[in-house]
Image (cartoon, grey):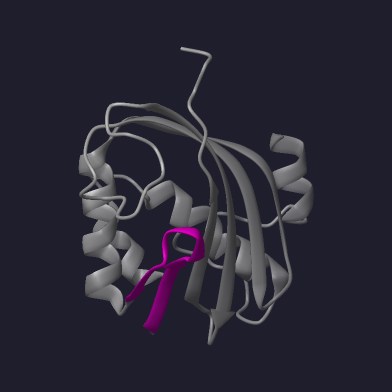
Amino acid sequence: MAQTMHAAAGGASFDPESPPPVGTTEHALWLVHWHFTWENPDQVDKLAELYHDDIVWEVPSRRIIYRGKKDVLDNYRRIFESAQGLKQDPIERYGTPERVFDDCEATFKLTSSHGFPNHPLPTGTRVAMRLIHNFHIKDGLIIRENGYEIWRPDISW
């Protein structure tokens, strides 16, 4: 998997202080790399640096949509409060200058509905979610993040 990520990035540098040139596939992959790196309770505010002012965050299967940095970041905080032991294992990532697709497996215990409105499994379930992200890039920033979720009970625990 790490080879797939590195190959997809074309050996791009993931130094947070030295992004690749805007408008390149490497820059788009750099944005998504740091998005996932900072997608945690301690660094969630850093995501704002990667987001366009007009960011839209959507999960079509749950009919959820958030607009603007504040609402998107508040949503992430609710997710972290509702997903005990959240872990994401990358499967594949590739992109173009305007899009990045990321495929991963997320596992967690769903402890409340607060961070996952309209979720399909009961609270208390250990979840194994296949999660595909489609990031849209504009002006060197993430302007849209669509998450396509496939919820399943995790039978490996």
Residue 126: name its quadrant: top left
> Which residue shows up at 76% across the image and 53% down it?
8
- The quarter of the picture where the N terminus appears is top right
Residue 127 falls left or right of residue 3: left
Magenta-drawn stretch contains 61: yes
Q: Is the residue 126 above or below the residue 40 in the image? A: above
> Which residue shows up at 41% across the image and 77% down it?
56
Magenta stretch mostly in which secondary structure?
strand
Q: Is the residue 122 above or below the residue 6 in the image? A: above
Toward the top, the furthest residue is 157
Residue 143 falls left or right of residue 82: right
In front of the other: 58 or 119: 119
- Residue 15 visible from this viewpoint: no
In front of the other: 31 or 132: 132
Residue 125 falls left or right of residue 14: left
Residue 148 position, x and y percent, is 56, 56
In front of the other: 26 or 71: 71
> Which residue shows up at 41% across the image and 70% down it?
57
> Which residue shows up at 20% across the image and 49% down it?
114
Residue 117: name its quadrant: bottom left
Q: Is the residue 82 above or below the residue 157 in the image? A: below
Magenta stretch?
A: 54-66
Magenta-drawn stretch contains 81: no
